[in-house]
Amino acid sequence: MNTKNGRAPTRTELVRKALEDEILGGDLMPGARLDELSLASRFAVSRTPVREALHQLSASGLVEVRPRQGAVVARITLRRLIELFFVMAELESLCARLSATNMTEAERRRLLEVCDDCGATVEQDLGMDAYYQANCRFHDAVYEGSHNSVLVDVISSLRRRGEPYRRKQLSRPGRMPVSQSEHWTVARAIIKGDADAAAEAMRRHVMVQVDVIGELLPMLPSVEAD
C-alpha cells in the first residue's frame, strides 16, 4: 500500500486503514470499545499513532469518543449516510459548475492528467487503493478549479465523513471502470466550459454511490438500516 504521493504509509495510516476495514467488514461492531493501550500492543506501535488514527476515524464518523468511556465504534444509520451523500452531491456539483468557468488552462491540463492517472490504475489493474487515491486527486482538481475556498473547506470536511464508504463502494465488481467513465464525462464538460453539463454529470457521479452502497449494505454491518 502506498499513499497518494508514493511514499510508504505511516504507522497512523496503517492503523487507521486496518481499523476502518474491520469496522466496515463487521469485525468491529457498533459500540465496541477501542482501547488505545490494547490497540498499541496489537499493532506493535506506541499509543501516539493509535490516538491519531482514532482521531481520524472520529472525523470520518466511524468512531465516537465518549466521556469516561473513550473511543467506541459509532452507530451509523443508512438514512444519515444517504443524507451525507445527497449534500456532497450538491456541493460537488456546484464545484464542477464553477470549475467549468473558473479553471485556468494549467488546471484544465491537470484535470486531464489526473483522469489519465485514474484510467491507468484500472488498465494496469493496480487495485482499489491505487484507484481511490487517483480518484481523490481527480476530485481535488475539480475542487481547486472552482476557486472558491469556502466551498472547498466545507466539501473537504464532509468528504472525510464519507471517505470510508466512498472507498468501500469501489469494491463492487465493475465499479472502478464505470467510475472512471463518469470522471471523463465530468472532465469533458468542464473542459468545454459547459457548466450545466458539468454540474449534472458530477451530481450523478456522486449520487450513484448511494445506489451502490445500498447494494453493499449487507456487507456493511456498521450501517444500521432504518
Image (cartoon, rainbow, N blue to C red):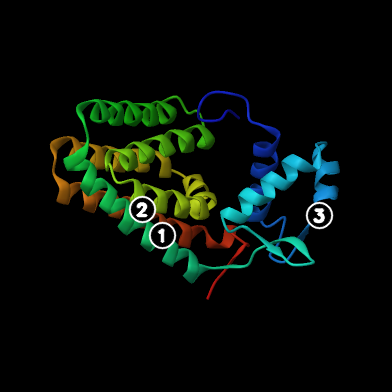
Q: Tell me the quadrant of the picture where the N terminus can be found.
A: top right
**Residue 58 vs residue 183, the one in the foreground:** 58
Q: Separation of disc 1 and disc 3 at Cα?
A: 30 Å
Q: Which residue is mark 3?
A: 35
Q: Which residue is mark 2?
A: 206
Proximity of marks 1 and 2: CB atoms separated by less than 8 Å: yes
- Secondary structure beneath dot 1 equals helix
Q: Separation of disc 2 and disc 3 at Cα?
A: 35 Å
Q: Separation of disc 1 and disc 2 at Cα?
A: 7 Å
Identify which amino acid the numbered label 1 is placed on.
Phe
Identify which amino acid the numbered label 2 is placed on.
Val
Q: Residue at x 20, y 27 (%)?
A: 105
Q: Earlier in the sequence, mark 1 or mark 3?
A: 3
Identify which amino acid the numbered label 3 is placed on.
Asp
Residue 36 in percent (x, y) is at: 80, 50
**Residue 128 vs residue 77, the one in the foreground:** 77
Residue 217 in percent (x, y) is at: 53, 62
Q: Is residue 86 above or below residue 164?
A: below
Q: Which residue is mark 1?
A: 85
Q: Residue at x 20, y 39 (%)?
A: 102
Residue 82 in percent (x, y) is at: 44, 65
Left or right, 178 with reference to 69: left
